[in-house]
Amino acid sequence: MAKDMTWLKSYERERHSNEPNESWISSRFDIQGLGWRAASEIYLPELRMTLGKACNSLKKLWKNYKIAGRTGEYRDDIAWKIVRIESVLGIEKTEFSELEGMDLEAEMETGTGSGLTDGELSDEEVELRREELEDERENDEYSTL
């Protein structure tokens, strides 16, 4: 168990270090000179959350991804969410074997997991997507309590 948590402890140590972490240099935002409080308040309209909440979500998604891998659960959706957040943050995107062959660029632009635009979705798919977004917002609100 302690060996499995090494990556998380390392992540926290690097996050609180005064030295810049090369894997967290953003191509979209100049956050190198900013303190954590200032950087965490940058709003990301693509994700409808701040940079701080996006980093927190990314941390939780990685933990869920690893747990799902150990238990043999489906984790394609978790991998897609990780890549989407990494893309919006402008950091290096992780390559997942679960996402091989998927057109991630088209999916990132539309914000859907299917690569289709809203005009190409059926009424049922639009309703399901709306419910998923509401659930994500509720989960984000509970995680900040």
Image (tube, rainbow, N blue to C red):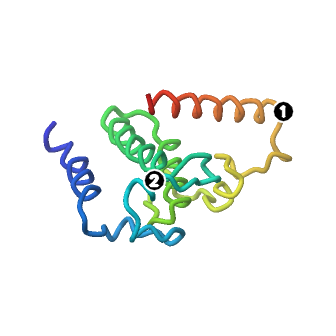
Nearest the viewer among 37 and 136 is 37
User: Is 131 on the left-hand or right-hand side of 67?
Assistant: right
Q: Earlier in the sequence, mark 1 or mark 2?
A: 2
**Tag 2: amino acid:** Ser
Mark 2 is surrounded, within 10 Å at the Cα level, by few (under 14), some (14 to 19) or many (20 or more) other residues, namely some
In this picture, residue 54 sits left or right of residue 6: right
Q: Residue furthest left?
A: 2
Horizontal and vertical percent for residue 2? 13, 40
Quadrant hosting residue 133: top right
Reply above or below: 121 against 36. Answer: above
Q: Which mark is residue 123?
A: 1
Q: Is residue 78 left or right of residue 5?
A: right
- Secondary structure beneath disc 2? helix
Q: Is residue 145 left or right of residue 23?
A: right
* Towards the viewer: 141 or 129: 141
> Where does the image place residue 51, in percent across and percent down from the top left?
49, 53
Q: How far apart, in angstroms, are the residues tagged by discs 1 and 2?
A: 37 Å
Residue bearing mark 2 = 40
Q: Return the mark for residue 1.
A: none
Q: Element under label 1?
A: helix
Q: Amino acid at mark 1?
A: Asp
In which quadrant is the N terminus drawn?
top left
